[in-house]
Amino acid sequence: SNKPVLMAGRSGIGKSSIIQDTLSRLSQPDGTGYKPDTVLGSVLCPASTGLFDSVQISAPPTAEGGVASEFMDQLVLSRVMFSSLTQAEKLRKVIQTRLVKRGREVLGPRPGEKVILFIDDLSMPQPEQFGAQPPLELLREFFDCGGFYDPRRLTWKAVHGVMTVSCATVTHGNSHPINERLLQKFCSLCLPTPSLQSIHNIYNTRSKAIESPVFSAEVRALRLDVVSCVLGVYYDIAE
């Protein structure tokens, strides 16, 4: 399905990291196959089950265990980070970056490729005086009409072969509500807030860089204490 996907949740729970890691794995050579070390393979054929035996694949597998190249396109990633000051022109340029001319007024990826546009964070653009958010209005036009206007030549550009994945922060701090007319275009997923233990394990793992010899023994000994203090301050502020 080419339906856009939106992952929503509180700030700091790993939405962007999850999406970026998944898309990076899918864009690797044979990343869209079903070998055990791929995204699909970890779901369809885990080592503990024979689930894959009952799944019918509509394309012949390759010798390496992936899907035949004529069935699955190579994925090309394009990422745009929204801020409160992001303009619609920036989004249009990012979409066009990975595209080539496929016709007189038609843009699309190169043959054998499919572009995935990752928008981070959809809730950031600040509404104008009358409530409009230009980058989101351009995105809605792109979903509804399959393209956008060239602001210089004032001609319509049809766009093919682009899928959209986005994340959004539940209204908090600098985030802003997203127009419901745009939200209805997405298949929305909600990422729950991890438990304190889960967040502690995440930051404990990522802070292991402090154990590098470039830090003194005194600093390395304080790693776990620093993680606990940072999380304590975060939860105090959040409450």
Image (cartoon, rainbow, N blue to C red):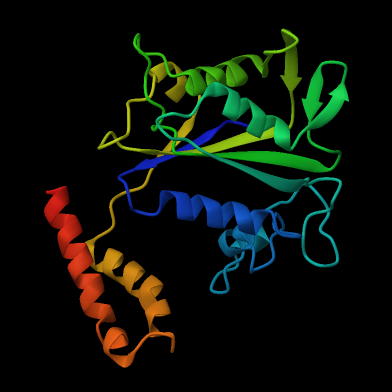
Report whether 23 appears left or right of 184: right
Observer able to see residue 184: no
Which is more toward the observer, 46 or 173?
A: 173
Which is more toward the observer, 180 or 173?
A: 173
Q: Is residue 144 above or below residue 55?
A: above
Which is more toward the observer, 22 or 33?
A: 22
Q: Position of residue 109 (x, y in %)?
A: 79, 35
Q: Position of residue 227 (x, y in %)?
A: 25, 71
Q: Can you tell which quarter of the image residue 139 is in?
A: top right
Residue at x-position 81% and y-position 67%: 64
Residue at x-position 68% and y-position 18%: 147
Which is more toward the observer, 63 or 81?
A: 81
Q: Is residue 184 above or below residue 174?
A: above
Q: Position of residue 212 (x, y in %)?
A: 43, 85
Report whether 176 appears left or right of 74: left
Residue at x-position 47% and y-position 55%: 17
Residue lying furthest bottom in this view? 217
Q: Position of residue 112 (x, y in %)?
A: 84, 43
Q: Can you tell which quarter of the image residue 168 is in?
A: top left
Q: Is residue 174 above or below residue 138?
A: below
Report whether 30 appears left or right of 122: right
Observer able to see residue 96: yes
The mark total stands at 0
Residue at x-position 68% and y-position 33%: 162
Q: In which quadrant of the rendered image does the N terminus lie?
A: top right
